[in-house]
Amino acid sequence: MKAQLDISYLGLVRNVLGCQGEKIEATPGLTIRDLLVILVEKHGEPFRASVFKSEGKLRSTTLVCVNDRDIDELEGFETKLESGEKISVVVGVYPPEGG
Amino acid sequence: MEAVLGREDVWLHSVCETCFAFCGILAHRQDGVVVKIEGDPNCPASAGHLCARGQAALISLYDPSRIQRPLLRTNPEKGIGVDPKWREISWEQALDLLTEKLQKVRAEDPRKLVIATFDHYALGVMIRPAWAVAFGTPNSDWVGYYCGNYLHASMYLTNGSFHSDFDLDYCNYAILLGNQQGFMGGLNANVAARKMAEARRRGMRLVVVDPVGTNAAAKADEWVPIRPGTDGAFILSLVHILLNELSCYDQEFLKRRTNASYLVQEDGGYLREGPKGKPLVWDRRSDGAIPFDESNADPALEGSFVAGGKKCRPAFQALKDHVKNYAPEKVAPITTIPAQTIRRIAKEFGEAAKIGSTIVIDGKVLPYRPVAVNIYRGAGAHKHGTHTALAVQTLNMVVGAFYVPGGHRGINLLGPSGRWAPGMTDEGLITPPAAIGRAARYYDFDETPPEDLGHREVFPISTNRSPIYEINLVNPKQSGLPYTPEVLIVCRRNLMMCNANPEESAKMLKQVPFVVNFSTHIDEVAEMSDLVLPDKHFLERFDLFPNRYTHTMSPHTGHFYWGIRQPVVEKPMGEAREWIDVLFDVAERMGFLEDVYKLLNMTLELKDEYKLDPGARYALEDIYDRWAKSLFGPEKGLAWFKNNGYHKVPRSVEEKYPSPFIRPRFPIYFENFLRAKRSVEKVANHLDRKLDLSDYQVLPEWKPCAAYDDVSPPYDLFVVNFKLPFHTLSFTTQNPWLSDLAEHNPYAYKILINAETAKRKGVKDGDAIWVESAAGKVKGEAKLTECIHPEVVGIAGVFGSWAKGKPVAKGKGVHFNTLLPINMDRIDPVSTGLDSCIRVKVSRAA
């Protein structure tokens, strides 16, 4: 049985994709890394350029969350996904700045 | 609420916002009127004390000049002194108009919206991480030019935090370089002032290096007047004397806690174990190169070696060789500080560091290095300010005075009870914890073309690219961006007074088709705006946890703490609203509020039971209640904070002095600058721009700013700006009590000029004089004094308001920023900090 994943796009990545989100069916137990490969294949260069700085490296302003938790606090790219989970891909999250 | 004989008489917890210390306050309200504001004894940020600004805040709450209702401009002509011909409109009309403008730009390209604010709380908690992201604009970090933007990135890089601070509990010898930490300046000003007084009573020697004999200088053991823009040369000379003349440095700290032992090649790069491998050190035991993190190594700090056929030397040796260029005899004519004074201060600093000594605190044995040099805006607001800040950090590190008792430290490197800790690069170097510096990790750079007005990818080692916003707004076609800004939202940010020359700022504002300003007054920006919306005074506003780990919470408070800024009056004046709330209304009208909520669920890290339902609508108070309960449990919701003010947790020894307890090392050699340079060059090529990349160097250097070399007559003097303890930027100038203080202060509204210099120019005390730079000129009253460098004139604060809507402030004092030009030659090429080191001529006004 396929896993149903609910993906939201927020911030600058939405500007280039033109959609708020989508539902994706995938193999259960796939990782965030696998999902991002699927999304790059599906959405092509605009998505890749918006989210990644180079092969396998997110831009410093990209935030990927699973059920609202930063993957950095989970297992990073190796975080496993189960059916019904909500994944957010956000671009444009900047460090606390000012001065 | 306590009733006395049927009359209301209550004290309410809140948080001050007349500067960026965010002290806890108690507001005394009788029969609906606030009659007194005091420091909240339960607040670690104020410890029950409050400065003049905080106490005077209540009079500004009732200022009759405040805007009462939304105002629409009817005069299409804009300019300084041009009457906007306001028409009062309803909030409904204002929201319709704002929504229409924002809908248009969001449909065309959301990046056409720009937000400029110095409202740290709203920006940091609600706007930047949520509202602006949901809208789709990256242009929301146009903050001030007035603080430490040359400095913050240097701190993130070296101490893993936003700030420069030092341990007044144990420090015995402090050098304040262009700042007044401990004299109502800097972090947690009220606490720091008391600790400074206690430290001086204890015998701490204080040396203030500044062109102006400031309040700090007046109370110091020694004031060292320095020529503006030469601080870096002075500090590097101290480093040279310690390393090359006195051999006074902390070998253990440098070997174990920094990258000083990493081998560097002739091209400046690390010698690595393979192309992308670990940096190597020279192990004196095995007499060979080994990875830096190998246990039981005895790394060399000095010497030169050949490893793998490549010539190399430890980074520390490179530093030692580098600073030989800063012999006191060479630096004295640059700084005007005599060579023997430089030598004496270096010797005193080195001896006071007590290298090798330890101290026991709470049963833990810690290195004891009771010295620090502290830097802020005055020393760094120059063309090469990043290098000055890095030189300062180098000095703190060579004596080991880094996150140990008595020494320099950043803030909040370790979170309460292990909630966060710094990160570490593959090279073993520190990066800020995500909680206080997400993405401020300056080791791996994006090479994509910039999308934002600040050109983030062109200036990757910076926390604030605000001057670039201005340069790009004035010349949008030259910015290389695929859009031109159309809507500008401004709140609590005086773009006319606190930038550079106002005529230049006016040109910039006129470029933007629709400017909306949330403001308490028709100030200088409001006069240039299309729509002005009445903003709440801070004493009318709700903010949960305004004391943020990133910006306003120093270890010298002894605690971590969470408080509330709540309204201390029943109703705001007129129809004033909180701008976050207004923007949430707009998001609802435009249909993206659910995305704002989704983002808040992530960024506030709300637990499942407190998450915001994207389909619902919450008042700000509801959101804050959920946030508080999510963090502290169901008993500590908003009601608890309203009644109790602060929740606080004492800091452990590890949280105050983390250096001995963490693995990441502090960089004293900036190999990553070579990578930054290559990356910036690629991005600049994308934009077809030629940039000066020469400041991306591996070791700090002093370089003259433009004013240093510009000796062409008649611009024979420098002008500098300095801070007073009872005013903050331009926003306290409309307060009548604080204005009264300034009028009675002999320096606040005057132009300081050295008595000898004035005599030479025929200027007498009290004369009206002109001060003129290539960018502009200002007139004021001369104040002759010994307390300023002979080559310098000094202008305090951000005075000289001209807006009719600020009748108290209007026409008082002198506007320093009028003298500042703004262009790419006048910014620090790394941080983008605006160079405020300017040559001027002085003449008597007729």
Image (cartoon, rainbow, N blue to C red):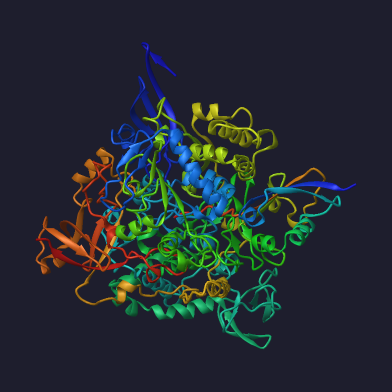
Q: Count numbered badges in the picture.
A: 0
* B705 is higher (above) or lower (below) than B793: below
Give the image location of residue B431, x and y in percent: 59, 60
In the image as oriented, which residue stretches furthest toward the bottom? B309
Percent across and percent down for residue B106 are: 55, 50
Which of B744 and B111 lies nearest the eye of the viewer?
A: B111
- Residue at the image point whose x is 27% and y is 46% from the top: B83
> Which residue does the image show at 44% across and 45% down from the upper left?
B119
- Image position of B101 with respect to A48: above or below: above
The answer to whether residue B662 shows anywhere in this view is yes
Vertical placement of residue B293 versus B186, above or below: below
User: In the rendered view, would you say B467 is above or below B322?
Assistant: above
Q: Is residue B541 visible?
A: no
User: B581 or B379, which is in the foreground?
Assistant: B581
Quadrant for the C terminus of chain B in the image = bottom left
Which quadrant of the figure contains the N terminus of chain B?
A: top left
Q: Name the foreground residue: B657 vs A73.
A: A73
